[in-house]
Image: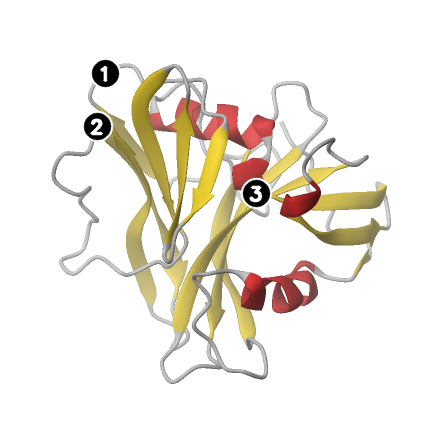
Protein backbone atom coordinates (compact mmCIF):
# COMPACT_ATOMS: atom_id res chain seq x y z
CA UNK A 1 0.00 0.00 0.00
CA UNK A 2 1.12 3.56 -0.71
CA UNK A 3 2.27 5.60 2.27
CA UNK A 4 0.84 9.12 2.44
CA UNK A 5 3.34 11.65 3.85
CA UNK A 6 1.41 14.45 5.55
CA UNK A 7 4.05 16.22 7.64
CA UNK A 8 6.39 17.23 4.85
CA UNK A 9 6.94 19.91 2.23
CA UNK A 10 6.27 19.76 -1.51
CA UNK A 11 7.64 22.45 -3.84
CA UNK A 12 6.00 23.33 -6.11
CA UNK A 13 2.64 21.99 -4.95
CA UNK A 14 0.47 19.81 -7.16
CA UNK A 15 -1.99 22.64 -7.73
CA UNK A 16 0.86 24.96 -8.73
CA UNK A 17 2.07 22.42 -11.29
CA UNK A 18 -1.45 21.96 -12.67
CA UNK A 19 -1.99 25.72 -12.91
CA UNK A 20 0.80 25.85 -15.50
CA UNK A 21 -0.02 22.55 -17.22
CA UNK A 22 -3.80 22.56 -17.61
CA UNK A 23 -3.97 25.51 -20.07
CA UNK A 24 -1.88 23.43 -22.51
CA UNK A 25 -4.54 20.69 -22.60
CA UNK A 26 -7.31 20.46 -25.24
CA UNK A 27 -9.99 20.09 -22.54
CA UNK A 28 -9.08 23.31 -20.70
CA UNK A 29 -11.92 25.86 -20.79
CA UNK A 30 -10.84 28.34 -18.13
CA UNK A 31 -9.86 31.98 -18.28
CA UNK A 32 -7.06 33.35 -20.44
CA UNK A 33 -5.10 34.33 -17.34
CA UNK A 34 -4.87 30.73 -16.21
CA UNK A 35 -6.97 28.50 -13.98
CA UNK A 36 -8.09 29.24 -10.43
CA UNK A 37 -7.86 25.75 -8.99
CA UNK A 38 -9.21 24.13 -5.86
CA UNK A 39 -8.81 20.51 -4.83
CA UNK A 40 -12.13 18.69 -5.10
CA UNK A 41 -11.38 15.00 -4.49
CA UNK A 42 -9.80 11.95 -6.06
CA UNK A 43 -8.34 8.55 -5.20
CA UNK A 44 -5.16 6.48 -5.54
CA UNK A 45 -4.14 3.16 -7.01
CA UNK A 46 -1.24 1.05 -5.78
CA UNK A 47 1.73 0.17 -7.96
CA UNK A 48 2.30 -3.58 -7.36
CA UNK A 49 6.05 -2.90 -7.36
CA UNK A 50 5.71 -0.06 -4.88
CA UNK A 51 7.86 2.30 -6.94
CA UNK A 52 5.40 4.63 -8.67
CA UNK A 53 2.73 6.77 -7.05
CA UNK A 54 -0.61 6.74 -8.89
CA UNK A 55 -3.21 9.39 -8.07
CA UNK A 56 -6.40 10.55 -9.74
CA UNK A 57 -6.89 14.18 -8.70
CA UNK A 58 -10.17 16.07 -9.17
CA UNK A 59 -9.87 19.86 -9.31
CA UNK A 60 -12.39 22.65 -9.72
CA UNK A 61 -11.50 25.64 -11.88
CA UNK A 62 -13.47 28.84 -11.30
CA UNK A 63 -11.57 31.07 -13.74
CA UNK A 64 -13.90 30.69 -16.73
CA UNK A 65 -17.39 31.88 -17.52
CA UNK A 66 -18.69 28.79 -15.70
CA UNK A 67 -16.90 26.53 -13.19
CA UNK A 68 -15.27 23.42 -14.66
CA UNK A 69 -14.19 20.20 -12.97
CA UNK A 70 -11.23 18.24 -14.32
CA UNK A 71 -10.01 14.72 -13.65
CA UNK A 72 -6.20 14.62 -13.69
CA UNK A 73 -4.52 11.19 -13.40
CA UNK A 74 -0.93 11.67 -12.26
CA UNK A 75 2.01 9.35 -11.65
CA UNK A 76 4.95 10.18 -9.37
CA UNK A 77 8.37 8.72 -10.12
CA UNK A 78 11.80 8.91 -8.53
CA UNK A 79 13.50 9.10 -11.94
CA UNK A 80 12.48 10.21 -15.45
CA UNK A 81 10.32 7.81 -17.48
CA UNK A 82 12.10 7.02 -20.75
CA UNK A 83 10.22 8.17 -23.83
CA UNK A 84 7.59 10.12 -21.88
CA UNK A 85 8.98 13.64 -22.17
CA UNK A 86 5.75 14.73 -23.89
CA UNK A 87 3.74 13.64 -20.83
CA UNK A 88 5.85 15.37 -18.17
CA UNK A 89 3.74 17.71 -16.05
CA UNK A 90 6.75 18.92 -14.07
CA UNK A 91 9.10 18.08 -11.23
CA UNK A 92 8.78 18.74 -7.52
CA UNK A 93 10.93 18.46 -4.43
CA UNK A 94 9.36 16.21 -1.81
CA UNK A 95 10.57 16.66 1.76
CA UNK A 96 10.79 12.89 2.33
CA UNK A 97 11.17 11.32 -1.11
CA UNK A 98 13.36 13.93 -2.78
CA UNK A 99 12.95 14.94 -6.41
CA UNK A 100 9.86 13.53 -8.09
CA UNK A 101 8.99 13.50 -11.78
CA UNK A 102 5.25 14.04 -12.30
CA UNK A 103 3.59 12.63 -15.43
CA UNK A 104 0.19 12.67 -17.06
CA UNK A 105 -0.72 9.20 -15.88
CA UNK A 106 -2.57 8.24 -19.05
CA UNK A 107 0.87 7.97 -20.69
CA UNK A 108 2.48 5.95 -17.89
CA UNK A 109 2.59 2.13 -18.21
CA UNK A 110 1.87 1.63 -14.51
CA UNK A 111 -1.43 3.51 -14.68
CA UNK A 112 -2.22 1.91 -18.05
CA UNK A 113 -2.07 -1.45 -16.29
CA UNK A 114 -3.77 -0.56 -13.01
CA UNK A 115 -6.78 1.40 -14.30
CA UNK A 116 -8.14 -1.54 -16.36
CA UNK A 117 -7.48 -3.73 -13.32
CA UNK A 118 -9.68 -1.36 -11.28
CA UNK A 119 -12.47 -1.55 -13.89
CA UNK A 120 -12.25 -5.34 -13.84
CA UNK A 121 -12.27 -5.57 -10.05
CA UNK A 122 -8.76 -7.00 -9.75
CA UNK A 123 -7.60 -4.03 -7.64
CA UNK A 124 -9.40 -1.55 -5.40
CA UNK A 125 -9.33 2.23 -5.21
CA UNK A 126 -7.34 3.60 -2.27
CA UNK A 127 -8.16 6.66 -0.20
CA UNK A 128 -6.42 9.78 -1.46
CA UNK A 129 -5.34 11.01 1.97
CA UNK A 130 -5.12 7.98 4.29
CA UNK A 131 -2.50 5.23 4.04
CA UNK A 132 -3.73 1.64 3.74
CA UNK A 133 -7.41 2.60 3.42
CA UNK A 134 -9.94 1.91 0.67
CA UNK A 135 -12.04 4.65 -0.90
CA UNK A 136 -15.71 3.64 -0.57
CA UNK A 137 -16.86 6.46 -2.87
CA UNK A 138 -15.23 4.85 -5.91
CA UNK A 139 -17.41 2.23 -7.59
CA UNK A 140 -16.80 0.12 -10.69
CA UNK A 141 -18.54 -2.36 -12.93
CA UNK A 142 -17.52 -4.69 -15.74
CA UNK A 143 -19.55 -7.19 -17.77
CA UNK A 144 -16.81 -9.80 -17.98
CA UNK A 145 -13.02 -9.65 -17.68
CA UNK A 146 -11.58 -6.21 -18.42
CA UNK A 147 -9.10 -6.23 -21.34
CA UNK A 148 -5.44 -5.54 -20.63
CA UNK A 149 -2.53 -4.36 -22.77
CA UNK A 150 -3.47 -0.70 -23.20
CA UNK A 151 -0.43 1.15 -24.53
CA UNK A 152 -1.68 4.18 -26.48
CA UNK A 153 -3.30 7.36 -25.15
CA UNK A 154 -5.02 9.84 -27.47
CA UNK A 155 -6.23 13.19 -26.15
CA UNK A 156 -9.64 14.42 -27.26
CA UNK A 157 -11.49 17.65 -26.37
CA UNK A 158 -13.02 16.20 -23.18
CA UNK A 159 -11.32 12.83 -22.66
CA UNK A 160 -8.22 10.72 -23.17
CA UNK A 161 -8.84 7.45 -25.01
CA UNK A 162 -6.66 4.46 -24.13
CA UNK A 163 -6.29 1.71 -26.72
CA UNK A 164 -4.22 -1.40 -27.40
CA UNK A 165 -2.79 -3.05 -30.53
CA UNK A 166 -4.02 -6.51 -29.47
CA UNK A 167 -7.77 -5.87 -29.16
CA UNK A 168 -10.44 -3.38 -30.15
CA UNK A 169 -11.53 -2.29 -26.69
CA UNK A 170 -11.01 1.31 -25.60
CA UNK A 171 -10.93 2.89 -22.16
CA UNK A 172 -12.16 6.47 -22.17
CA UNK A 173 -10.83 8.56 -19.27
CA UNK A 174 -13.09 11.58 -18.83
CA UNK A 175 -11.13 14.78 -18.29
CA UNK A 176 -14.14 17.06 -17.89
CA UNK A 177 -16.41 15.73 -15.14
CA UNK A 178 -20.14 16.31 -14.94
CA UNK A 179 -22.39 15.42 -12.00
CA UNK A 180 -24.92 12.64 -12.49
CA UNK A 181 -28.39 14.05 -13.03
CA UNK A 182 -30.27 11.64 -10.76
CA UNK A 183 -27.89 10.60 -8.01
CA UNK A 184 -25.81 7.52 -8.84
CA UNK A 185 -23.93 7.83 -12.15
CA UNK A 186 -24.84 5.39 -14.89
CA UNK A 187 -22.37 4.34 -17.63
CA UNK A 188 -23.33 5.25 -21.21
CA UNK A 189 -25.21 2.81 -23.42
CA UNK A 190 -22.91 0.25 -24.99
CA UNK A 191 -20.31 0.41 -22.22
CA UNK A 192 -18.62 -2.79 -21.06
CA UNK A 193 -17.60 -1.27 -17.72
CA UNK A 194 -16.97 1.95 -15.85
CA UNK A 195 -15.46 3.71 -12.84
CA UNK A 196 -17.35 6.42 -10.97
CA UNK A 197 -16.65 8.52 -7.91
CA UNK A 198 -17.48 11.61 -5.92
CA UNK A 199 -16.08 15.12 -5.56
CA UNK A 200 -16.89 18.51 -4.02
CA UNK A 201 -18.33 21.25 -6.20
CA UNK A 202 -17.16 24.88 -5.80
CA UNK A 203 -20.31 25.68 -3.81
CA UNK A 204 -19.47 22.97 -1.28
CA UNK A 205 -22.08 20.43 -2.36
CA UNK A 206 -21.12 16.83 -3.10
CA UNK A 207 -21.41 15.42 -6.63
CA UNK A 208 -21.04 11.98 -8.17
CA UNK A 209 -20.16 11.17 -11.76
CA UNK A 210 -18.45 8.82 -14.18
CA UNK A 211 -14.63 8.93 -14.29
CA UNK A 212 -13.83 6.34 -16.97
CA UNK A 213 -15.77 4.14 -19.41
CA UNK A 214 -14.69 0.86 -21.00
CA UNK A 215 -16.04 0.11 -24.46
CA UNK A 216 -15.77 -3.26 -26.23
The answer to which of marks 3 and 2 sits earlier in the sequence is 3
Tell me what residue is drawn at x 44 percent, y 28 percent.
124
Q: Name the residue under label 3.
A: 55
Q: State left or right for residue 160 relative to residue 214.
A: right
* Local SS, label 3: strand
Residue 192 pos. (x, y %)? 21, 28
Asked if the residue under mark 2 is in contact with the one under mark 1, i.e. CB atoms within 8 Å, the reply is yes
The answer to which of marks 1 and 2 sits earlier in the sequence is 1
Tell me what residue is drawn at x 78 percent, y 36 percent.
80
Q: Name the residue under label 1.
A: 144
- Structural distance between the alpha carbons of marks 3 and 1: 26 Å
Residue 53 pos. (x, y %)? 66, 36
The answer to which of marks 3 and 1 sits earlier in the sequence is 3
Seen from the viewer's position, the closer of residues 151 and 207 is 151
Model colouring: secondary structure
**In the picture, which quadrant includes the N terminus?**
top right
Tell me what residue is drawn at x 32 percent, y 37 percent.
139
Looking at the picture, does residue 159 appear above or below residue 114?
below
- Structural distance between the alpha carbons of marks 3 and 2: 24 Å
Seen from the viewer's position, the closer of residues 83 and 47 is 83
Q: In which quarter of the image is residue 47?
A: top right
Q: In which quarter of the image is residue 24?
A: bottom right
Can you tell which of label 3 and label 2 is closer to the viewer? 2
Counting other residues with Cα less than 10 Å from the Cα at mark 3, is it few (<14), some (14-19), or many (20 or more)? many
Q: State left or right for residue 182 relative to residue 99.
A: left
* Local SS, label 2: loop
Counting other residues with Cα less than 10 Å from the Cα at mark 1, is it few (<14), some (14-19), or many (20 or more)? few
Q: Name the residue under label 2.
A: 192
Tell me what residue is drawn at x 18 percent, y 55 percent.
183
Amino acid sequence: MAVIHHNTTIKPTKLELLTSWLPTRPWYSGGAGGPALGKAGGFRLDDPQGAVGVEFIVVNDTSGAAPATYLVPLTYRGAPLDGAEHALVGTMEHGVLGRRWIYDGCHDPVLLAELPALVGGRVQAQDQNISDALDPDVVRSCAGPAPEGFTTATDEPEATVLSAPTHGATLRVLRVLRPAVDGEPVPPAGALGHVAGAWDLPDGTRARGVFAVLYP
